[in-house]
Image (cartoon, rainbow, N blue to C red):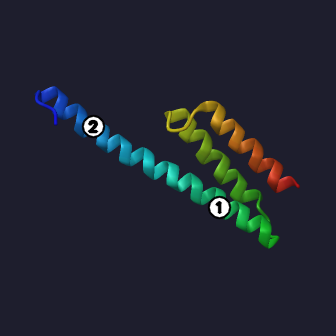
Amino acid sequence: MANHKSAKKRAKQNQVRRMRNKSVRTSLKTLEKKLRAAKEAGENTEELMKKTQSAIHKAAKKGIVHKKTASRKISRLFKFTNA
């Protein structure tokens, strides 16, 4: 455990950020699953794709996922929905 006041604060900040990032990553996975399920069910996925793409871009902008990872995910989702 941290001994200095600043190290204790840093540990607390890291934990808060880790939980926030985990929440965002989980929601991204959920959106992807919903999109894939909608496509499999034969529903219109246009609106859901927009929402998913926006969420992935926001996560990349905040540094939660890498920029190229976000680009790859979006590309694969478009490829899946347009097939």
Q: Is residue 45 above or below residue 8?
A: below
What label sits on residue 64 in the rendered view?
A: none
Q: Nearer the viewer, residue 44 or 15?
A: 15
Residue 67 pos. (x, y %) = 61, 31
Residue 30 pos. (x, y %) = 58, 60
Which of the image's four quarters has the N terminus? top left
Assign a secondary structure to mark 2: helix
Q: Amino acid at mark 1?
A: Lys
Name which residue lies at 64% across and 38% down.
70
Assign a secondary structure to mark 1: helix
Disc 1 packing (10 Å; few <14; some 14–19; many ≥20)? few
Q: Residue furthest front?
A: 1
Q: Residue furthest bottom?
A: 41
N-term mark: 1 or 2: 2
Q: Label 2 belongs to which residue?
A: 13
Q: CA distance from mark 1 to mark 2?
A: 30 Å
Q: Amino acid at mark 2?
A: Gln
What label sits on residue 33 in the rendered view?
A: 1
Q: Is residue 19 left or right of residue 2?
A: right
Name which residue lies at 71% across and 67% down.
37
Disc 2 packing (10 Å; few <14; some 14–19; many ≥20)? few
Which of the image's four quarters has the C terminus? bottom right
